[in-house]
Image: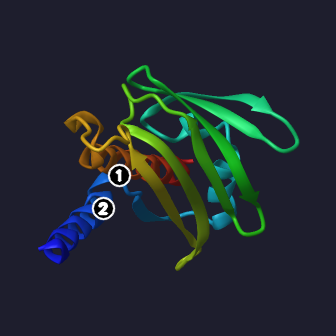
Amino acid sequence: MLKRFLLIAALLLSVTPASAHGPTPHKVEESIVIAAAPSVVWEKLADFAGLAGWHPLVATCTVAAETASNVERTLTLRDGGALVESLDEMDAAGRSLSYRLIKPNLDSFPVSFYSATLTVSEAPNDGSTVRWSARFYRGDTGNYPPETLDDAAAQAAMTKFIQAGLGGLKEKTERR
């Protein structure tokens, strides 16, 4: 009887921690081919404050702080919300930049944290392939988030933001 009780207690205790974990990270990876040389596309991406010039969901983009080791930008979204991001790395030779969200705005963008990378590579016919990947967490990192801040809302928002950005970059670059 005691063995049976101990076995049941052990099973119950081993299951409890598994159901108490927080959110898992999600990822979006999108790419687009642009009919422009990689150097032309990279010039637009390398301007960390220039996002509003080609991203249709961003009204303004301003550099809020810039030091030798840190660049922060504030994105004002078309819906009026603002996000603050920090540049992690810019590799001009590799045509790649990485950045992260440092101040979320859950009313405008249902993601609590993200890190993202944009890369430009050569494509056929003197074109470019732009890849944009992001790893992120939903807006509410508790165990029972509301629908507006759950995994599906975060995935949809991040996918929409990246796809709109790639489309805007293509349109502005090819129209130059």
**Closer to the camera in the image, 99 or 24:** 24
Going 66% across and 41% down the picture, which residue do you hit?
86
Q: Mark 1, residues whose alpha carbon is within 10 Å: few (<14), some, or many (≥20)?
A: some
Residue 91 spot, x, y in % from top left: 75, 62
* Residue under the point 49% across and 32% down: 104
Q: Quick check: 119 left or right of 28?
A: right
Front residue (pair 90, 4): 4
Counting from the top left corner in percent of width and height, residue 108 is at 38, 28
Q: Residue at x 69, y 64 (%)?
A: 95
Q: Which residue is mark 1?
A: 159
Determine crowd level at label 2: few under 14, some 14-19, many 20+ residues with C-alpha closer than 10 A: few
Question: Quadrant where the N terminus lies?
Answer: bottom left
State the scheme by which the image is colored: rainbow
Q: Earlier in the sequence, mark 1 or mark 2?
A: 2
In the rendered structure, the answer to whether residue 12 lies left or right of residue 132 reads left
Left/right of residue 2 with respect to residue 26 in the rendered view? left
Q: Is residue 130 above or below residue 173?
A: below
Q: Position of residue 147 (x, y in %)?
A: 20, 37
Q: Nearer the viewer, mark 1 or mark 2?
A: 2
- On residue 18, which mark appears? 2
Please tell me whether mark 2 sits on a helix, a strand or a loop. Answer: helix
Amino acid type at mark 2: Ala
Q: Classify 119 as above or below 110.
A: below
Rendered residue at 55%/70% (across/down): 127
